[in-house]
Image (spheres, coloured by chain):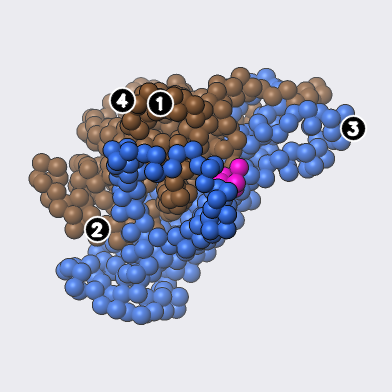
Amino acid sequence: MTAATDAQQPGGLAARRGRADRPYRRPARPVRAALHIFLIGTCLVWLAPLLYALYTALRPYASTQTHGYVSFGGTYNFTNFSNAWSQGDLPLYFRNSFVITIPALVLTLFLASMVGFVVARHSFKINIVLLMIFTAGNLLPQQAIITPLYKLYLMIPLPSWLSDSGYLDDSFLGLILINVAFQTGFCAFVLSNYMRTIPHELTEAARVDGASEWRQYRQVILPLCRPVLAALATLEFTWIYNDFFWATVLMQTGANRPITAALNNLQGQFFVNNNLISAAALIVAVPTLAVFIALQKQFVSGLTLGATKG
Amino acid sequence: MSMNPASTTPVSAPAPAQPAARRPKRRNSVTRLGARDRLTLTLMAGVPTILTVGLVWIPALATIVLSFTNWNGIGGLSQITGAGLQNYRVMFTIYPEFPPAIEHNLLWLAVFFAVPLPLGLYLATQLNKQMRFSRVYQSVIFLPVVLSLALIGFMTELVFSPTQGLINNLTGHTKQSNLVDWLGDPHLNIWAVLIMACWRQTGYIMILYLAGLKSVDPSQVEAAQLDGANEWVSFRHVVWPALRSVNIVVMVVTVIESLRAFDIVYIVNQGTNGLELLSVLITDNIIGETSRIGFGSALATVLLVISLAFVVPYVYTTFRKDRRS
């Protein structure tokens, strides 16, 4: 398991970064040129859908109607972006997304780090069962549990200030909780692997000084986990923001949907205007693309630390 | 929890055999902890466990139980009546959407094994070499992984739209006479969707293999090549055996992602007309006009059992190995 081997020492993240370009023997010159040509070709194919979306979004509908979609000429402007932004109510949906994603992210990391602490720093018999419950839970297809979950959500009442519907169903809290419950497994797995590599002497010393378990967690272990927490935060932000299924089923009020799920309504609203849809799709991709570009190393290391995430 | 029988036995089994030998190994046993610390630890592990068990495992168990009942979802739990195997009988014999859904899920799985897996592995082995621009190539191929699957559904429509799409415009198939209806033709649309799904999956697999390749000792590869082994032979005999554990992860990811497939087809046409999937049928039975909880649960049980058949052995071997080391 890569997670286990990579996290062997707390310096694992940093150390791995330095070794990024492993010195395999350099291939001979013509072979290398052929390889570069293949890779450049692959990259162009890979970028094509996004570039096509961007190009389409930059052209007014009328322009593509007269010239065709794969063509040059006509006008280029940002009208589609501003129209999608205002006509599609994107600010509202962005707000919903962040109202769900940020608390869910914080809560996931908080709960997962606590589970990780208990499992990694103590050898209770139940630990392995706990880890299995969390990890396996994270790997189930969401649709396998949605039917009873939906009915369960309709049975749990909430005060009206928390939910317009009066139930956990159709509420922000409901979406936050299911995202947390589903994602905690992955984070607990990664964090417990990492915490296991922190020398026992550190908590031993704190214990001798009379530090409670909570203080050992809060003041000794948690600060040492900062790099992993950063990696997981990057990853979980993307996953929770990208959630489509939970929001589609468990949030019926259209105006409360996060942006990933709300896009589906926009599709009906914008109908066959692919230029407008392209612009909206690209706007929706901006937060995850920004996170990826700014924090690519954290993103990739989070993914490979766990390597179990489906 | 459906996994308890499998997981508790081996954990507790060795204990009676040699309890004396194991006890001193434990660094902190419960008895060393004060009452307050014990309460703290119980809460720290207990609260997240209650949440996950309550919202994931109890619904998973309830899925199985409800699959043997009839319930239209209206009215309380008292409306539930036993149905025996009726839901399964209907599903396997007369439910018209079931065979195509299973077929598409299997096709999805086969394509994920046939394309993103070897391609991701090939790209990873090449990009792991000391090479200029390796990082740039990696970033570009990885890029679709950060996009949501829903968004990839939209990209599918953009790329494969019959008149406005990239593919038909490039190949000159936009006229009424020679139009290729990628999204509407029930024999073609699954392929359009799969191409875009592979677009995302390849980068994911590549990153997993790149991580796995870091555990391959480069001096061994070099030694093999000095001994005259060509690239294929050194890959086959040095690199591939070292990728064993990452291969297991990749396999689980591939299976789970194929079973989870939902968002793209739901965006394209709500998973109908050639794009049926198990996940869509389950969802239709709760959010459609006809709410058939028992029947939906029977479909979900099929999905649950298939995924547990992969997840349980995987999780079990992972943690058993973990425990030994």
Give the labeled residue for mark 2.
A152
Residue B293: x, y in percent?
A: 29, 67
Gap in Å between the C-alphas at discs 3 and 1?
A: 56 Å
- Asked whether residue A257 appears in the rendered view, the answer is yes
Specify start and end residues of the magenta stretch as a single range: B321-325
Dot 2, crowdedness within 10 Å: few (<14), some or many (≥20)? some
In the rendered image, the quadrant that contains the C terminus of chain B is top right
In the figure, the blue chain has which letter?
Answer: B
**Residue positioned 52% across, 46% down in the render:** B23
Residue A99: x, y in percent?
A: 24, 34
Q: Chain of mark 1?
A: A
Secondary structure at badge 3 equals loop
**Residue positioned 39% across, 53% down in the render:** A142
> Is residue A262 or residue B57 the one in the foreground?
B57
Give the labeled residue for mark 1.
A208
Give the labeled residue for mark 4.
A79
